[in-house]
Image: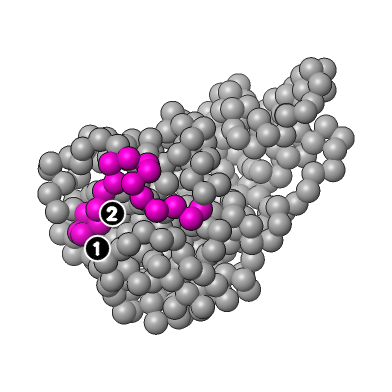
Amino acid sequence: MGVPDPNEGNALMTISEPQAAASFHVVNVDQATAWDGEEGEHWTEHANRYDAAVRRYDSYLVDAARLAEDDRVLDVGCGAGVSTRDAASVATAGRAVGIDLSARLVEEARRRSQRAGLANTAFVQGDAQVHPFESATFDVAISRFGAMFFADPVAAFANVARALHPGGRLVVLSWQELGRNEWVLAIRKTLAAGRTLPEPPPGSPGPFGLADEVAVRRILARAGFSNVELAPVVEPVLLGSDPEDAFAFVSGLGITKGLLEGLDITTRAHALEALRETLAAHATGDGVLLDGAGWLITGRRA
């Protein structure tokens, strides 16, 4: 980790910024291995693509957060920091602090914030499930598809709740179940190559870790949140500007690489050609779009 930007001043609001990956406590070890490794590398290199893919969801998060000019905002699983910057652009007299497991993404988020001229942001590498946030520091906690990966979501959201002042707001975007998200389902079906692929176990850390409405209500209630609501958000996911652009992006995704593992050369080539055809079938004048379905989850610290 690099030295924090001196222009950030007291932006961390008592959150100490680790100088090396080994200097912060991690309980989500598997996720940290991925996000502070190959997965985080790919997300950093293709941050613009990942941000563009779910750009249609961004306004739902910002609008639901109902940010005030002087709000202090915590962004959980901030990635390259687009939601942190969105929050900071509204809370101009407050602060927006992003936390993520990936050192590369945190550094990229910091660079992008500096380039945007935002002096009221800060970013820290850490595991939000156990990070020692100062109690009652924040007014709002947000997460843009970054809070589905906790090994113990009750403990994680309880830790986030402690970071909020009483009555503080929680706003989370997560994915609904696999069957409602064509952008993942189409990739899985196309690359199955005759295999029967297992469904992600309900509630397991991953993109669909907060897909079950009943489970989410139970988790957040146990974590100390009240007035929990889940509203469906249905928007397409952009995978590329045209079929070839989409294929170049999707063929490098972790899910694609994982599904291709173990296939012989011929089967692998056929699967990739089928993927190319699937993406071409979803080309529109606005790019290659596949259906997506998310939850907008809101609540308050009790």
Please report the residue visible at 77 percent of the width from the left and 28 percent of the height from the top.
Answer: 262
Give residue 276's position: percent from left, percent from top.
Answer: 70, 25
Disc 2 packing (10 Å; few <14; some 14–19; many ≥20): many
Disc 1 packing (10 Å; few <14; some 14–19; many ≥20): many
Question: Magenta residues: mostly which secondary structure?
Answer: loop
Please report the residue visible at 27 percent of the width from the left and 66 percent of the height from the top.
Answer: 134
Q: Which residue is mark 1?
A: 72
In the figure, is residue 107 to the left or right of 248? left
Q: Are marks 1 and 2 in contact (CB under 8 Å)?
A: yes
* Among the two numbered marks 1 and 2 on one chain, the one whose residue lies closer to the N terminus: 1
Image vertical order of residue 246 relative to residue 203, above or below:
above
Dot label at residue 212: none
Amino acid, disc 2? Val
Q: Which residue is mark 2?
A: 97
Mark 1 → mark 2, Cα distance in angstroms: 8 Å
Which quadrant, please, contains the C terminus?
bottom left
Give the farthest residue toward the front.
22
Highlighted magenta segment, given as a residue range: 12-28
Give residue 186's position: percent from left, percent from top.
Answer: 72, 40
Foreground residue, 297 or 254? 254
Foreground residue, 248 or 16? 16
The secondary element bearing badge 2 is classed as: strand
| Residue 204 position by quadrant | bottom right
Amino acid, disc 1? Arg
Foreground residue, 248 or 109? 109
Image vertical order of residue 123 relative to residue 191, above or below:
below
The secondary element bearing badge 1 is classed as: strand
Give the farthest residue toward the right.
194
Please report the residue visible at 75 percent of the width from the left and 51 percent of the height from the top.
Answer: 199
Please report the residue visible at 73 percent of the width from the left and 40 percent of the height from the top.
Answer: 188
